[in-house]
Image: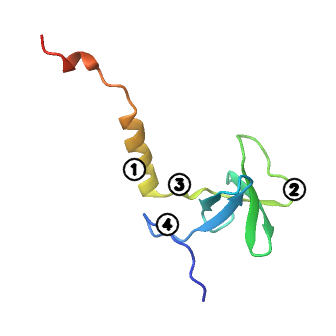
Amino acid sequence: MADFPRCRSCWAVLRFVVMASGKRMPVEPVRDPKGIVAARKVGRDFVDGVVLHRGETPPEGFTTFRPHWADCEHAKRAHKAETEAATPRDRTTDFLF
């Protein structure tokens, strides 16, 4: 039995889609008709991945997957921390008069 790749944060089983840019995107291993990552199967791999925009349909012969970050609790917490850190602070309280 082959070892399946897993998320380093939540330990969930992953599938990787090779995007058109050449980068590998982690997605949920099961196909999802409502997924936003579309790729075509070549041999055992899914390649030429694209992210679909709202209302866009996948190209003919492409399968859709849900990106792993949409379900990974650790990714959600990390994203929340990034957005909170990016919030500008009120600098008027930093000065003592």
Structural distance between the alpha carbons of marks 3 and 1: 10 Å
Name the kind of residue labelled 4 in the image. Cys
Q: Position of residue 3 (x, y in %)?
A: 56, 82
* Badge 2 or badge 1: first in the primary sequence: 2
* Badge 4 or badge 2: first in the primary sequence: 4
Q: Position of residue 6 (x, y in %)?
A: 51, 71
In contact (CB < 8 Å): disc 3 and disc 1: no
Seen at 20% across and 18% down, the residue is 93
User: Residue 7 got which mark?
Assistant: 4
Placement of 65 over or under 2, stated as above or below: above
Q: Position of residue 32 (x, y in %)?
A: 68, 60
Placement of 45 over or under 27, stated as above or below: below
Name the kind of residue labelled 3 in the image. Trp
* Badge 4 or badge 1: first in the primary sequence: 4
Q: Quadrant of the C terminus?
A: top left
Furthest toward the right, the residue is 60
**Mark 3 lies on residue:** 69
**Mark 2 lies on residue:** 60
**Mark 1 lies on residue:** 77
Q: Quadrant of residue 11?
A: bottom left
Determine crowd level at label 4: few under 14, some 14-19, many 20+ residues with C-alpha closer than 10 A.
some
Structural distance between the alpha carbons of marks 2 and 3: 25 Å
Q: Is residue 32 visible?
A: no
Name the kind of residue labelled 2 in the image. Glu
Q: Position of residue 78 (x, y in %)?
A: 41, 49
Seen at 62% across and 58% down, the residue is 25
Q: Quadrant of residue 35?
A: bottom right
